Image: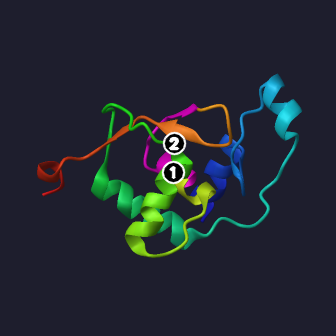
Amino acid sequence: MKEIESIINQYQITGEGLLYYSTSDKKTFGDKKAMYPINPKSVLLCRKWLRCFAVKGKKKPDVNSYELKHVVGKFYGVYIEHDAFIVAGLMGGFTTRKDGSLSCYFNMGLKTVNERL
């Protein structure tokens, strides 16, 4: 749980997604705080999915963190919070690139079938 809290504070993650405090972001997003605690079970499921299906440093998929959280949720048949996916990605060592919203892109690609075996 402390690792999750550390990531949240370092990257300014709210219940809605990832905040960066540049001047332009502050005007848009202000000083939002997490609306609810991040669900550690969701973070664990996301980390499990990332270990199985994602690989660092490959070409980024053309989907952002918000879209990928839906993929994970469908895979496990549960609701996954956006912030839980972002925290799991950061905990897994993936770096991020903002996409102009509260979502982000990670430096990841998806493993091939052979890479998963």
Residue 64, label in figure: 2
Residue 78, label in figure: none
Under mark 1, the amino acid is Glu
Callout 1: few (<14), some (14-19), or many (20+) C-alpha neighbours within 10 Å?
few
- Residue 35 on the magenta span: no
Under mark 2, the amino acid is Asn
Secondary structure beneath label 1: helix
Would you say 105 lies left or right of 32 here? left
Residue 67, label in figure: 1
At x 53% / y 73%, what residue is drawn?
A: 41
Secondary structure beneath label 2: loop
Q: Where is residue 87 in the image (x, y as percent from the top left)?
A: 56, 53
Report how far apart the C-alphas of labels 2 and 1 lie in the structure: 5 Å
Q: Give the range drawn in magenta.
A: 86-98
Please tell me whether residue 16 is drawn above or below residue 102 in the rendered image.
below
At x 60% / y 32%, what residue is drawn?
A: 98
For the C terminus, the image quarter is bottom left
Please tell me whether residue 92 is drawn above or below residue 37 in the rendered image.
above
Would you say 55 lies left or right of 70 here? left
Q: Position of residue 13 (x, y in %)?
A: 69, 49
- Quarter of image, res 53: bottom left
